[in-house]
Amino acid sequence: MNIKEIIKISLTKSLFFVLLTTFITKIFYLIFNVEKQEDTIIIDAIFNKTYYIIIFGLFLLLAYKDYEKNKNTSFYDFLIVTLFYVLMSYIFSWVIDFSFYHIHEFVNNPQKENKTGLLILTDFSPYHLNNFDLVQYFISTPYISIIEFLKSGNFSWLLNIFSPPSFLIAIVIIYFKSLYLLFEKENRIKSYALIPILNNITLLRITNKPIWWIVPLFIPFIRFFPKFFINQVLAKKYKKNSPFALGMTFLPWFFYGKIVLGKTD
């Protein structure tokens, strides 16, 4: 594991992701002098969740591609790249949100100096302050309370980080990338890995299972049975045991990744 390389790749790719999402959105607010909530509709429609997801996934894939250039890589290296990429994306986004919000508040402060209490809350700010519980907690909490917090083992703030869409998107990307590399190893059409029906048909052909199994593969709960038998063949082919095949069935992104992601696994 090359931790310096991981940090470098994650840092640069997460920075580009944030610049093309959070930062550029705030810049558009400045360019168009957005001061009212209705003025954000067009900008928010352009830089919507779908746009964020596409850019997030694109730079995560680029991070994987850069790290694959190393001679010795393992599946766990890719998980660490993912973790660093997501964490740094959160931090960069929070810093940008924090900066724009307080700059906006400072510039507009003269307009608010005669307002008190609930009247201040009526002012709209497009530069909302992103909620990053971990940072907010350590800024606003005394040192002794932080020690007590760590001793208590209450790490509920982690749910903010390991929550949609960040890690769920990353998991989906890891799964489809694993299928893509598996099809490449098996000399199959790699692009089929990205198409739900075709990737299942390809897996059936790789494992010499009947094509009609495609029907139960799309029935909830029942699909786990043919999937397990498919994964048993794959596990045996790659010198893994039956429990590993079970893992491939119920946690495919992780166990498929262990087969094909990395050069030392």
Image (cartoon, helix red, strand yellow):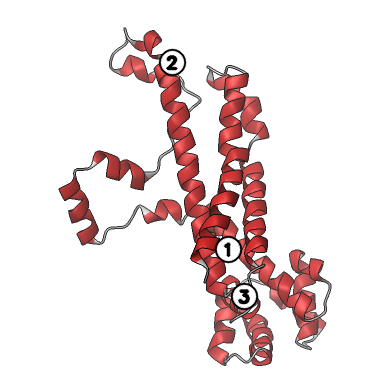
For the residues labelled 3 and 2, the Cα–Cα distance comes to 50 Å
Counting from the top left corner in percent of width and height, residue 75 is at 57, 74
Q: Mark 1 falls on what kind of element?
A: helix
Which residue is under mark 2? 107
Q: Return the residue nearer the eye: 39 or 66.
A: 66
Residue at figure coordinates x 72%, y 73% from the top left: 181
**Which of pointers 1 and 3 indicates the residue nearer the eye?**
3
Which residue is under mark 1? 171
Residue 195 lies in what quarter of the image?
Answer: bottom right
Which residue is under mark 3? 262
Residue 255 lies in what quarter of the image?
Answer: bottom right
Query: Horizontally, is 265 left or right of 150 in the view?
Result: right
Discs 1, 3 touching: Cβ within 8 Å? no
Q: Is residue 215 visible?
A: no
Amino acid type at mark 1:
Ile
Q: Along the polypeptide, which appears first: circle 1 or circle 3?
A: 1
